[in-house]
Image: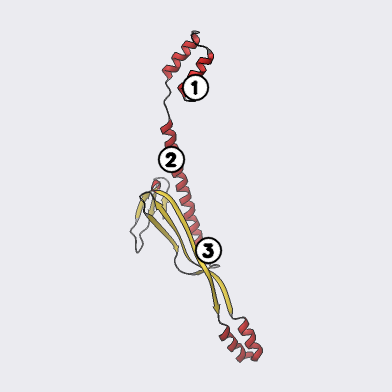
Amino acid sequence: MHADFVDKKILFEKSLTTPSLIINFDDVISYTPTVYGHSVSKHHRGARGITGGLIAGPIGAIVGASTGGKDYDVINDVHITINLKDGSSRVLKYITTEYKSDSLILKSLIKDYHDGISILDAIIAENNQAVINVADTRNYQPINTDELAKLKSLLDDGIITQEEFETKKKQILGI
């Protein structure tokens, strides 16, 4: 995914299963980040026990068998699902194979994943600001300066009181 904050467009690059796609920022409505992983246990206790026994006798067999297990965490799926205004979605896949949780490759891919989330947060914030600006524009009522001038003239001529002037002015200004 490449975001152009000048033209307000996103490019999703072509993959084996999907064509490239260019969309406008305002087509993005939300996203769902996903990280899946699990623990892996590898038990080589039997093989290590036999090897230890051959090398160091019964004590070596006990030591080899007791140190043969290995547990570690892996991450095997990291992606972001981007939901679009037309009801479709686009999935950005960062990880599709197992990586040990302390792997340098995994750390680099997770950084890219967090960068993608930051870009999407900025796009959605910009979209929300645009919605607020449009709403402000819709509620905007032009001020009738002629009516205010006439009202001020009536106040200056003593036809209405200051209190009546203030009340009517607030009504004209919509406050």
Residue 100 spot, x, y in % from top left: 53, 69
Closer to the chain start, of discs 1 and 2, is: 2
Instruction: Give above or below for 147 relative to 103.
Output: above
Residue that appears at 49% across and 64% down: 36
Residue type at tag 1: Lys
Residue 104 spot, x, y in % from top left: 53, 66
Left or right of residue 70: residue 17: left
Instruction: Give above or below for 18 relative to 47.
Output: above
Tell me, yes or no, whether the two marked residues, 2 and 3, touch with CB atoms within 8 Å: no
Q: Nearer the viewer, residue 10 or 41?
A: 41
Mark on residue 162? none
Mark on residue 170? 1
Closer to the chain start, of discs 2 and 3, is: 3
Q: Nearer the viewer, residue 159 or 69?
A: 159
Instruction: Give above or below for 43 relative to 98.
Output: below
Dot 2 alpha-carbon crowd within 10 angstroms: few under 14, some 14 to 19, many 20 or more: few
Dot 1 alpha-carbon crowd within 10 angstroms: few under 14, some 14 to 19, many 20 or more: few
Residue that appears at 62% across and 82% down: 66
Closer to the chain start, of discs 1 and 3, is: 3
Left or right of residue 65: residue 116: left
Mark on residue 131? 2
Residue 27 spot, x, y in % from top left: 38, 48
Residue type at tag 3: Lys
Work out how far the residue at label 1 is from the one at label 2, CA to CA, in angstroms: 27 Å
SS category of the residue bearing label 1:
helix
Residue type at tag 2: Val
Dot 3 alpha-carbon crowd within 10 angstroms: few under 14, some 14 to 19, many 20 or more: some
